[in-house]
Image (spheres, rainbow, N blue to C red):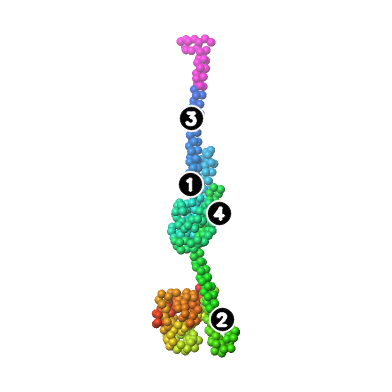
Amino acid sequence: MLVSFSSNGWHRGSSNVFWENNRFIVLLLTAVLLAFVSTAVRLVAYHQHKKEIDMLSSKLRAVIEGEEPGHLLLEPSDPYYELARAINGVQSMQRDISKDFLTQQRGYFSLMEYLTIGVMVLDQDQKIYLGNHAMSELMGREMNVKGQLYVNEVRTYELSRLIEETFQTHQDQHQEIKIEATNKNVDAHVVYVPINSHHFLVMALLYDITELKEIERMQMDFVGNVSHELKTPITAITGFTETLLQGAMDDKQTREEFLKIVYQESLKLTELVEDILSLARIDSKPQLNLSMLNLHAFITDILRTFKPELEKKQIEVDLQIPADCQINVDKNKLQHVVNNLIQNGIKYNKTAGKLWISGEVREKDWCLSIQDTGYGIPKDEQERIFERFYRIDTSRSRQNGGTGLGLAVVKEYVKALSGKIEVKSQVGVGSRFAVTFPLEMKDNLS
């Protein structure tokens, strides 16, 4: 088609070509614009999504590291809304679990602090994770030094060896050991505690058995002493009886002499058995049977039973107790105390000596004292006379028939009555024993 131009403008044919050319340009420009807008939209969406993904990732990292960031807040229409809710839920669950763990941990730590058993926990790097107060007391130094190597803190070789064997063998160890720093005997258990296939703990448990060991020693000493004390009169009785049976009974003088010895030894044996039974009764019956008692009348009745012995040694008794002195006490237990103290006051008194017995009720307690003019007790031995089988002078004690248990029995009965006993003595002058008891006593001391 030809294009021509006149004064009137474009011819029709040329006009169509122009518009078709311009239409192509418009379409091209529109396509370019649409492409630009699409790209811009995608870029905006990408940056928006990246921002949200970064925010979600940052939130997860914070939760993993134990931090407590605020919850994610997204619109319900946001494509990451459900994911954000899930992350918020994980954070809440993690916070609750951590809170419960810390609460339980504090409870366990508090419990261990109140345990009388020494506890020390070591991690697999042989470092102290925790140690309680009882462990520090038993070891004689602070053991709750978290992060320190145990070899630098445990100064007892036997315990260190048990711990090392547990680390090497992964087997529990057990041994009784003595801690020199505190002079304590302990029953040591070192336990291997597996956590998982790669981690474990080692726990040292120390049970204080010092008191138990002392009781065992006292029991062995007691059995040994009783055997020895029983053997002496039994041997004498057996020996003199055998001699009599072999013909000595035909000699009247010898028979009477030997029978007198047998009788005296049998009395010693009876006294020893009674003292042993008294100690057994004290241990097995701590309950008190309290009643009101007139102390003056009570002591007067007891003195009547000792009248032959008092007259034999010509001992004068001075009773200094008010006639209206009333006390609340277990009569049977008090009678054991008074009987023994009066008996000693006679037995170890000099001939034609004197015995003072005084008592009074005070504001909060009442007291009773028995004083003699006997041999006296050396000052350095006055604390030991209450020990079982302890004797100041062996020959004199045997001569006077003492078992070495009398004052031990007195001490136990005084203790059962919540009282205390004191002694003041001077060699060659005499001794004074004073017992003090509270006015108010409980019916059961167990």
Q: Which mark is residue 171?
A: 4
Query: Is residue 305 on the magenta stretch?
Result: no
Residue corresponding to mark 1: 66
- Residue type beneath disc 2: Gly
**At x 46% / y 10%, what residue is drawn?**
7
Residue 7 is covered by the magenta coloring: yes
> SS for tag 1?
loop
Tell me which amino acid carries mark 3: Ala
> Which residues lie in the magenta part?
1-28
Q: Which mark is residue 40?
A: 3
> 432 or 95, which lies in front?
432
First in sequence: mark 3 vs mark 1: 3
- Mark 3 → mark 1, Cα distance in angstroms: 39 Å
Q: Residues within 10 Å of mark 1 (few under 14, many from 20)?
A: few
Structural distance between the alpha carbons of marks 3 and 4: 69 Å
Q: Position of residue 206 (x, y in %)?
A: 50, 60
**Counting residues from the N terminus, which is met first, the one under dot 2 or under dot 4?**
4
How far apart are the two marked residues, 2 and 4, measured between alpha carbons?
Answer: 60 Å
